[in-house]
Amino acid sequence: MGKIAPSILSADFSRLGEQIREVESAGADYIHIDVMDGHFVPNITIGPMIVEAAHSVTELPLDVHLMISDPDPFVDDFARAGANILTVHAETLNHVHRTIQHIRDKGVRPSLALNPATPLDVLDYILDDLDMVMLMTVNPGFEAQKFIPEVIPKIERLREEIDRRGLDADIEVDGGINPDIIGRVAKAGATVFVAGSAIFYSEDYEETIRLMRERIKDPE
Ligand code: DX5
Ligand code: ZN
């Protein structure tokens, strides 16, 4: 069954703890935390201190997405802060295998993210070592952007490859996911669904998450 990961980038930061508890009781599976450095992506957000704060208010696994040019020196900090999943971008790494092993050695589940235009073949020799692959469905940097439909066949191809190898790695999709699109990406083979604006800007978080689950199970 799919997992729903509300992205706190769309939360009200002046009452972040409350917002995290609200999506937790509305049925979220993970809390997605977007870390941006103003260099790899044109926006600056938050760091390990906020991850630590989030960790203190929720039981849910923290799904930490590093959109930073040089993630290696920060892996230990995010592990210590309480990250359960750490996603690094293939576009930022010179030594993908080393970074992935480093994350695993810290007791954190490693995940590799690919921007929309990054080809799947960067996964050829690392896929077996990953707990999750994140396929960006927008260009990273901001919430509330439009879903890029060209990623759908990419999700399908990755699903085929994961199944062909007999792996159980998740495929996470991130960017522009809402109740209207989620059925299509689930059908294509995604298993973890990040949603920022679609959840936090909705009237009723519980109802939005419920609707998303319904569409994952039964895509129209
Ligand atoms: C984009 C971030 C996403 C984003 C999701 O760079 O990685 O997690 O905040 O927000 P929505 O769901 O509004 O596109
Ligand atoms: Zn993200």
Image (spheres, grey):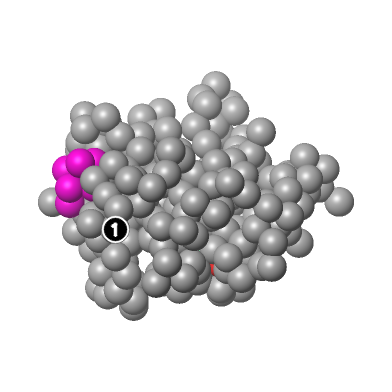
How far across and how far down the image is residue 169, in percent? 49, 32
Q: Nearer the viewer, residue 14 or 78?
A: 14
Q: Residues within 10 Å of mark 1 (few under 14, many from 20)?
A: some
6 left or right, relative to 87: right
| Residue drawn where x is 58% and y is 46% of the image | 25
How far across and how far down the image is residue 161, in percent? 56, 34
Q: Is residue 43 above or below residue 63?
A: below
Q: Is mark 1 within 8 Å of ligand 2?
A: no
4 left or right, relative to 42: right
Residue 66 seen: yes
How far across and how far down the image is residue 20, in percent? 47, 54
- Residue under numbered circle 1: 50
The N terminus: image quadrant? top right
How far across and how far down the image is residue 175, in percent? 54, 63
Residue that extends furthest to the top in the rendered view of this protein: 166
| Residue drawn where x is 73% and y is 55% of the image | 207
Q: Secondary structure at mark 1?
A: helix
| Residue drawn where x is 26% and y is 29% of the image | 107
Residue that extends furthest to the bottom in the rendered view of this protein: 42
Q: Which residues are magenta?
A: 74-80
* Magenta stretch contains residue 52: no
Instruction: Classify residue 95 by image quadrant.
Output: top left
Q: Amino acid at mark 1?
A: Ile
Q: Is residue 23 above or below residue 42?
A: above
Residue that extends furthest to the right in the rendered view of this protein: 220
Number of numbered markers = 1
